[in-house]
Image (cartoon, rainbow, N blue to C red):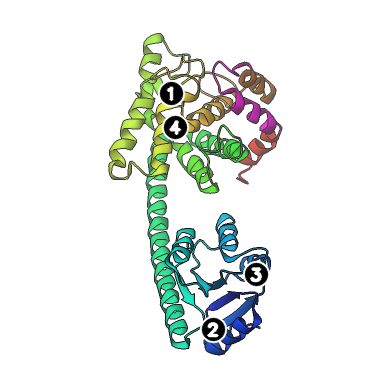
Amino acid sequence: MGMDSSFAKILVIDDTKTNIEVLEGILCGEYDMYVALNGKKGLALTEKVKPDLILLDVMMPEMDGYETLRQMKARGLVDDTPVIFLTAKADAKSEQTGLDLGAVDYIVKPFNPDLVRLRIKNQLEFKHQRDHLHELVEEKTLDLRKTLKVMLTSLGALAEYRDTDTGEHIKRTQVLVQMLAEKLKNHPDFSAAIPSKEYIEFYATAAPLHDIGKVGIPDEILHKPAKLTDEEREIMSKHPQMGYDVLSNATRELADHPLVKIAAEIILNHHERWDGMGYPNKLKGTDIPVGARLMAVADVYDALVSRRPYKEPFPHEVAVAEIQNGRGTQFDPIVVDTFMELQSQLPALYERFKDGTI
């Protein structure tokens, strides 16, 4: 019985048809009205219609108004929707119960038409203001995220500028990290670190920064066409800390943003080992941040299958075997197991990088 869809949508949940008819008479012509005669139907209609406001009777058979609201809350159906209870009981205890459950107001029967209109109008105006504020916050958050992505991408380009081999490495490892994060997001040991799709994007955005510290490594070491000496390796091992310092200085005022935190963790820790024998801080096991554990596997696999000044590329099968051999010593066992589930896709993926389709 909807009216003009441009009107605010009001759902009335009440088992008494007389009450519904009275409310329709009061509100007719002002709102788009929907009706449910019990709590169960009210839940279904709330999910389908997504009303702007709900008028919910307290006293109903089978499922009363309190239980209906509890279930609405549990399902996330009324997170931004005001609920006003309808009741013939005007005692303070009943009102307190409803307000504690999340109702915004009470309307007492028999209905006073002017009071009904005023309370509904006020709550819809509050909702409009909240929605507008939420939109502004989302807009500012999106602007901040875009600014951060541009900043971090620019920083990542510094490493690519210094090392032509690194450019394609950055792109390939970014895709590998994203694939691993996507696969692990529902794993109980990783869901806290990858709580949403947004965080998968954060890991993918941060991954290209992992070697930013190489901007501080001398060219004669960075481009040496042979294995490094012990002294040169010692210098090279400083690049995680250098990169961390570069990022910290560039993003000081945004240090608490999750994208910046993830980037910092990846940069500083992607050469740590599961067995605690890595660098720069000899972190061990789950003390190593998740992003760094993903990056470690992606970084080593790509280095193995890529041509470098000091080596020819290894075949995919050899690289996969090396990753498997590092399970539980160099790498997180769960990340390795996940990599093994994905590895068959990689040869075709790398061909797409070669022919420029990625």
Q: CA distance from mark 3 to mark 4?
A: 46 Å
Q: Quadrant of the C terminus?
A: top right
**What residue span does the magenta drawing correspond to?**
325-344
Query: Can residue 161 be seen in this snapshot?
Result: no
Circles 4, 1 touching at the beta carbon (< 8 Å)? no
Q: Is residue 73 visible?
A: yes
Q: Are marks 1 and 2 in contact (CB under 8 Å)?
A: no
**Which residue has dot 1 on it?**
223
Which of the two discs, 3 and 1, sits closer to the camera?
3
How would you rate the neighbour count of disc 4 (Cα within 10 Å): few for under 14, some for 14-19, many for 20 or more? many
Q: Measure how far apart labels 2 and 4 are at the Cα level.
A: 53 Å
**Which numbered dot is residue 45?**
3
Q: What separation in Å lies between label 3 and label 1 (alpha carbons)? A: 65 Å
Q: What's the residue type where badge 1 is placed?
A: His
Q: Residue at x 55, y 47 (%)?
A: 197
Secondary element under disc 4, as helix, strand or loop, is: helix
Residue type at numbered disc 2: Tyr
Amino acid type indicated by mark 4: Ile
In the orientation shown, which residue stands out farthest toward the right? 344
Would residue 82 be counted in the magenta stretch? no
Which amino acid is tagged 3? Leu
Residue at 60% in and 41% down? 182
Q: Position of residue 261 (x, y in %)?
A: 39, 38
> Mark 1 and mark 3 in contact (Cβ < 8 Å)?
no
Please tell me how crowded label 1 is: few (under 14), some (14-19), or many (20+) other residues with Cα within 10 Å.
some
Q: Position of residue 163 (x, y in %)?
A: 43, 31
Residue at image location 64% in from the left, 63% down from the top: 63
Nearest the eye: 111 or 260: 111
| Residue wearing tag 4 | 266
